[in-house]
Image: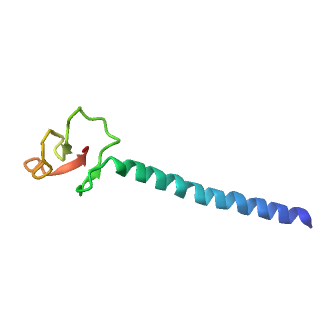
Amino acid sequence: MRRPRIRSALAAAVLSAAVIAPVAIGTGTAQAATVHCAHHTTGTCGTHIKHPKGVMAKCKDGTWSYSKHFSGTCSHHRGVKYWFK
């Protein structure tokens, strides 16, 4: 009678760990990724993408933007796809 209880407790512990672990890991990575993105952005953070030094954004048409100001970045290139600063 004691073994079924132990198995049930063990199964419950493993199941709860499997459910909780991805949530904790996912939350940590999302926060880490957004730390480097500018607060003003409406596009996607591009910290995971390799990009040339000094680039501000990657435009939707694939060109790099080295603009000094956020306003108007990629305005003639269908908008910003990824922000880097």
**Residue drawn at the location 24% of the way across and 58% of the way down:** 42
Judge from the rendering whether residue 26 lies leftward or rightward of residue 84; answer left or right. Answer: right
Provide residue 28's location: percent of width, then percent of height: 47, 52
Q: Position of residue 84 (x, y in %)?
A: 26, 43
**Most foreground residue, 17 or 60:** 17
Q: Position of residue 48 (x, y in %)?
A: 35, 41
Query: If the image is split into quadrants, where does the C terminus sit?
Result: top left
Residue at the extreme top? 53
* Res 14 → quadrant: bottom right
- Tell me what residue is drawn at x 84 percent, y 61 percent: 6
- Nearer to us in this view, 37 or 20: 37
Query: For the view shown, which residue lies furthest in the left direction?
Result: 76
How was this image coloured? Answer: rainbow
Position of 17 with respect to 50 (left or right) is right
Nearer the observer, 78 or 85: 85
Residue drawn at 81 percent across, 60 percent down: 7
Quadrant location of the N terminus?
bottom right
Q: How many labels does the image show?
A: 0
User: Residue 82 location, x and y as percent?
Assistant: 25, 47
